[in-house]
Amino acid sequence: MSRTASPDPRPAAGPRPLPAGPSSADPGPGPRPLPAGPSSAEQAEPTAGTRSVVPAVATSALHKAFGRRIALHDLTLQVGAGEVFGFLGPNGAGKTTAMKILLGLVAPTGGQALIFGRPPTDPAARRRVGYLPEHFRFQEWATGTELLQFHGRLAGLGTAERAERIPELLERVGLAGRGGERVRRYSKGMTQRLGLALAILHRPDLVLLDEPTSALDPVGRRDVRELVRELAADGVTIFLNSHLLTEVEAVCDRVAIVNQGRVVASGPLDELAGPVVQLRLLLDRVDRDLLALVGRHGEVTRVEGTAVTLAVDTLDIAPDLATLLVRSGYRLFGLVPVQRSLEDIFVDLVGEVREQ
Amino acid sequence: MNVLVVARWTLLEARRRRLLLAGVVLSVAFVALFAVGFTLLYHSQERSLVDAQAQVTGPDSLGPRGELLALSTVLVVLGLYGVQFLAALLSLFLGAASVSPEVDSGALHAVLARPLRRLDYLLGRYLALVGLLTAYVVLMSGALLLTARIVAGYQAGDVTRAVGLMVLQIYILIAVSLLGSTVLPTLANGVVMLALFGLAWLGGIIAFIGTIPPGNELMANLGTAVSLLLPADAVWRGASYHVLPSSLVAASAFTDQAGPGLPFASTAPMAPAMLSWALAYPVACLSLAVAWFRRRDL
């Protein structure tokens, strides 16, 4: 498949449909700086096979119950082609179930899921999809190369293509020279790397990664981040399930946070962080007077030792605040504007839901 | 196309798990044991009959030729019974191990996320196992029949039908255990399959007892009813009829001389209705397996 499609895959017409949730407003373009492409031409009617128009993933009111347990309540999501999408949530939030529905492995009890506009139960739709399962279990009696050959055949790669692609992939995921060994002898990290190779074997347009770094050491994690960035640069859509927030922060354009089968927030990372601006003050001491003093200029959100985090309306007050503190006899070591981290957002949202 | 990819993968698995090696070693041992036992028994019986004939002149009812033929028949039927029993157990185990272990371990997730229909996956698994066990049954029963022919000049009534029906039994057993494997966890399926197989065997015995003169229709019918549940033993009995030499069958010498015959072989051909059922059975099992597996959440 040619990769000549526009680098700006977002449908330019109108605001993107977004799932319901506290911060579902997502009016602006995503945070990823993308070179201007012929996007105006793409506002034309959606033609079949034009990856720029048909969303890579679209679910509406997806519902899944396993007996009495409801894994997904009402999942509505849309991931544009070329996006790097982070799907976040605590364990048991329904992330894996959602991913399995997108692969036709699990049938929803309600709602609809589409990949590139087709139902995932259609094998032709899955031809464009690569998948790394959460537990990355493969046939252990086979060698890495045999597994790649088998999956290559299933994905429709020809003999010559497989012969060229497999060694290249083993090299790319850091398994060069290990393809002849049985998967049984692989370490967990090696197996996960093999799983990544399997996921991108047939140059898919959409890659679903379910906790892709759970077994990897820090070097392996960095490798995966690089791999994701390379794929994204090639225009591949990435759907990343994770509860490792730093990872998601590092690679994703847009995230959705799910809890108990519902999307509780979604949008570009910087928008999720919200307009709330915080100032972190590093002082020589923190006492009641100080808290009262800074409390007049904002809301104290955290006190750690002699560091105070203050939510303020605008960063413009920073110089005056510094002057005020120094005049009141405090020694100021630092005054830094900070944005809420994904972890803060996550804990706020998931914690809120849990408390209900 | 994908069916063949999966079938090939299944054969590779059989090789990697040393199933092929174990199968070949055991089979060679089995055939060798049969050949040695058959030769020794046949020749010792032949000698004692020659001695007896030297003392007692005059033809007796069966004659030494007839007695030797009866002995060969019993040995060949026993040998083939062993072959079909081993093949049946292998079918049940391989069928039971074909789907559920991969579902349980999660190894199937990545495979079925490919553009592979679940129907093709099941058919590929089935084809490979059927191919393996057909080769097993044909080679083993061929070797046994050939041994009997060389040593004793034994001629089965209809080798093609005998082996064909033994192979049909394999198709039935793999299909039913594959069906079980899509529904039940591996161990539970193994237990259910062995119980079913035992029940079918018992059904055959009950039906056999029902045919012992003066005959008991209720028992015969009960046996048939059980055979409908799993027509494996019924098919084997059908095969065993074609193993008997035609002369023996025509004269009914075997049944007349040796009482009601062997409890695990049949002196009558398979009823056409049962044969039709046996032919439809694997198709029905596979259809059910596909219908169930397509809807199953993984």
Image (spheres, coloured by chain):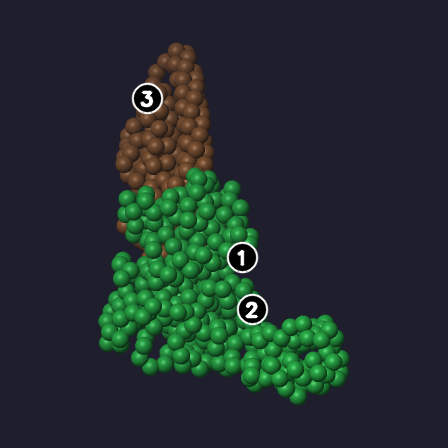
Respond whether the residues carrying marks 3 and 2 are from the same subunit. Answer: no
Dot 3: what SS? Answer: helix
Q: Quadrant of residue B61?
A: top left
Q: Nearer the viewer, residue A205 or A4?
A: A4
Instruction: Provide residue B182's location: percent of width, then percent of height.
Output: 43, 56
> Label 1 marks which chain's residue?
A
Colour assignment, chain A: green
Q: Is residue B267 visible?
A: no
**Which class describes the residues within 10 Å of circle 1: few (<14), some (14-19), or many (20+)?**
some
- Chain given the colour brown: B
Sort mark 2 into few (<14), some (14-19) or many (20+) by Cα contacts within 10 Å.
some
Kind of residue indicated by mark 3:
Ile
Q: To which quarter of the image does residue A19 belong?
A: bottom left
Residue type for callout 2: Pro
| Image vertical order of residue A28 relative to residue B286, above or below | below
Q: Say which chain tag 2 marks.
A: A
The residue where tag 3 is placed is: B150
